[in-house]
Amino acid sequence: MSTPTTPHQLRIDFVSDVSCPWCAVGLGALEQALARVAPGIEAELHFQPFELNPDMPREGQDSIEHLVEKYGITEEQVRANGANIRQRGASVGFDFDLDRRKRVWNTFDAHRLLHWADEVDAEKQRTLKKSLFKAYFTDGLNPSDPELLVRLAGEAGLDAQRAREILAGDEYAAATRARERLYTGAGIHSVPAIIIDNTHLISGGQPAEIFERALRQIAGAAPQQTAEA
């Protein structure tokens, strides 16, 4: 009697920033790919910190002004890029309302909270991450606002009071900085960067088909396991 095979279990470290639109696109595409390869392949996601604008002051900066200055492009190019991002977002079920995203904010406190969430429960961390993307890119809210962060943590099933305590001090600041240095030291200087089983790197907001192919290839190269009869 043959024994059924157990799913291939993969670890995925998703290095990203909550103010990175291509990270929201990439996550949506990755989740589409994971749905396609289930149930034969399963993955646990862990979201790792990366700050696109680590020196952004607390008051933030006008979003169009920021993009024009940072990338040396015109306002017209910014708006054209936004239209492309909206289209890609729609293809993975994510709604960008960039007209509501008036400012670019510092995201370090959001990363501190995500670091804590990962210690508590990886699925709750994923829920919090997706809520942060929606809050910023769809609702135009400030991801550095502690009240918003506490509310989203609670809605993700995390302890809202504990989240408030973390944000009121500097807990997880050193650990988050260390994790940032780990990935930049490994050569990651743009996001999203998706690392599978600490070995395979996929860069950028790729289409679901690219992620699906990579997941199948990586799982296919892994030793086959069988469940006990």
Image (cartoon, rainbow, N blue to C red):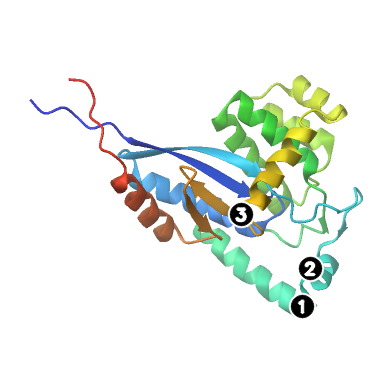
Left or right of 43, for residue 219: left
Task: Measure how far apart labels 3 and 2 are at the Cα level.
Answer: 16 Å
In front here: 217 or 210? 217
Answer few, some or many: residues within 10 Å of disc 1's Cα (few below 14, many 20 plus, some between 14 and 19).
Answer: few
Q: Give residue 2's position: percent from left, percent from top.
A: 11, 28
- Mark sitting on residue 73: 1
Q: Which residue is mark 2?
A: 67
Q: Give residue 187's position: percent from left, percent from top.
A: 62, 56
Q: Residue at x 66, y 24 (%)?
A: 158
Vertical side of 72 occupied by 2: above or below: above
Q: Give residue 92's position: percent from left, percent from top.
A: 51, 56
Q: Residue at x 78, y 46 (%)?
A: 107
Q: Give residue 82's position: percent from left, percent from top.
A: 67, 68
Task: Measure how far apart labels 3 and 1 are at the Cα level.
Answer: 21 Å
Left or right of 226, for residue 107: right
Report if residue 39 is visible in the image. Answer: yes
Q: Secondary structure at mark 2?
A: helix
Q: Secondary structure at mark 1?
A: loop
Q: Which residue is mark 3?
A: 23
Q: Residue at x 63, y 42 (%)?
A: 48
Question: What type is the residue that disc 2 sits on?
Answer: Leu
Vertical side of 36 occupied by 176: above or below: above
Answer few, some or many: residues within 10 Å of disc 3's Cα (few below 14, many 20 plus, some between 14 and 19).
Answer: many
N-term mark: 3 or 2: 3
Pointers 3 and 1 in contact (CB under 8 A)?
A: no
Question: What type is the residue that disc 3 sits on?
Answer: Cys
